[in-house]
Amino acid sequence: MVGDWAYLDTAATAQKPQVVIDAIARCYGPDYATVHRGVYERSATMTLRFEAARATVARFIGAATDEIVFVRGATEGINLVAQSWGQRLNAGDRILISALEHHSNIVPWQMLRDRTGIIIDLAPLTADGRIDEAALIAMIRPETRLVAIAHVSNVLGGVADVRRLADAAHAAGALLLVDGCQAAPRLALDVAALDCDFYVMSGHKLYGPTGIGVLWARAEILDSMPPWQGGGAMIETVTFEATSYAPPPGRFEAGTPHIEGVIGLAAAIDYVTGIGIERIHAHEAALVKQARAALSGLNSIHLLGPEDSAGILSFTMAGVHPHDIGTILDDAGVAIRAGHHCAQPLMGVLGVPATARASFGLYNSAEDVDRLVAGLTRVTRIFGITK
Ligand code: PMP
């Protein structure tokens, strides 16, 4: 429970622990100063904390500190890759994505396609709503330069076997980009073991602030990428004639950074690792199991996604629009998400206009699931559905 509210929309954004709010308040209060440029002590201290936060993020995902690029969120991370790394692609090159991707892992590639003439291929799903990995692997062609997939689907909750897809992509000379937005808050991550090439995530889904996220890429890939935004902090020297650029990650962080976002994100990561990501995963898995068992007792409900979905449970109800479900549940103090979840193409594949989605976080309890089930039973009564 969050207060007296059953908050079941953590996949959209997580509620913030007090330690994160306190870290941001301290940052804006007694500690406040800019980073990287100040010659006075407070700025130097803030710079140390800012760079220590980068090291915290790096440890959290098993990366080297210089491979961590701070961005606005997963969306900006993917756009950065499309606009910078994407410059090396030519007409006829191919990018392979899956049918369950979030718009942020579709639209940047379409924009790149419209600029360059690349081709986007679409891997299908299995009957239970996972990426069909065998089919995806069979679709990797010599022209495929990048495979880009969600680690955990924000609609169906299925977990991709990243290592398997990385091996297949690399065998064909392609790279693998992983959208880790929904994985970072609930799966232990080690980018070296996953052997992917790019990994993106958003701070606000990881119990941290909005407006901050992470792009990780292998050092040699980041080194080879041109800057995407110009300005302060991303340069080595500037004259009116020419500019030389800073090495990564600074090359990709033009302008004054989101200082309190970075500090708040590190506080969130410390909080999550203090609890233990495996414990969070097991806790959410138990709640999903409880919800699946209870909801499968309501005839009108159709559960979507695989049995072992990670923290996320989408469903539809015969004869009731998900928005009506969401509104009636809201009256009962239960917050779920209803809509296309920024995955409109997936709705087409599922053959529904929208789904209702309950998603769990470390603060949810069995009582929240009970309230969800009671709320849905009320929906069936209001709509005159017999169970
Ligand atoms: N990918 C996935 C799987 C997501 O769930 C989301 C957020 N719903 C995003 C990308 C985009 O994240 P953001 O809006 O924080 O950039």
Image (cartoon, rainbow, N blue to C red):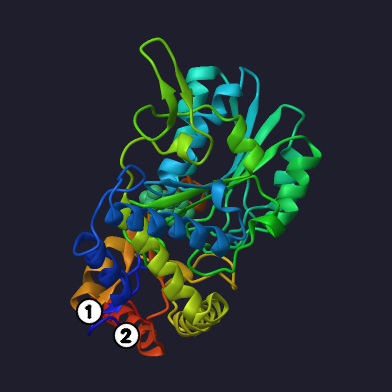
- Identify residue type, mark 2: Arg
Asked whether the residues under the numbered discs 2 and 1 touch, taking CB atoms below 8 Å apart as contact, a structural biologist would say yes
**Crowd around label 2: few <14 · some 14–19 · many ≥20 (10 Å):** some
In the depicted structure, whether residue 321 falls above or below residue 116: below
In the depicted structure, whether residue 222 falls above or below residue 179: above
Q: Which residue is rendered at x = 30% and y = 55% of the image?
A: 41
Q: Which mark is residue 333?
A: 1
> In this image, 12 relative to 384: left or right?
right
Q: Nearer the viewer, residue 159 or 53?
A: 53
- Identify residue type, mark 1: Gly
Instruction: Find residue 385 and report its horizontal and vertical position in percent.
Output: 33, 76
Q: Which residue is rendered at x = 32% and y = 85% of the image?
A: 371
Please say whether residue 325 is visible from this viewpoint: no
Instruction: Find residue 274 and report its horizontal and vertical position in percent.
Output: 48, 79
Q: Which residue is rendered at x = 66% and y = 49% of the image?
A: 196
Residue with the most extreme top position: 241
Q: Nearer the viewer, residue 86 or 35?
A: 35
Q: Quadrant of the C terminus?
A: bottom left
Q: Which mark is residue 371?
A: 2
> In this image, 160 relative to 291: left or right?
right
- Secondary structure category for the residue under label 1: loop
Residue 320, quarter of picture: bottom left
Residue with the most extreme right position: 171
Instruction: Find residue 45 and report its horizontal and vertical position in percent.
Output: 34, 58
- Secondary structure category for the residue under label 2: helix
Q: Which residue is rendered at x = 29% and y = 68% of the image?
A: 23
Q: CA distance from mark 2 to mark 1?
A: 8 Å
Marks 2 and 1, the one that precedes in the sequence:
1
In the depicted structure, whether residue 248 falls above or below residue 326: above
Residue 144, quarter of picture: top right
Instruction: Find residue 302 and report its horizontal and vertical position in percent.
Output: 47, 69
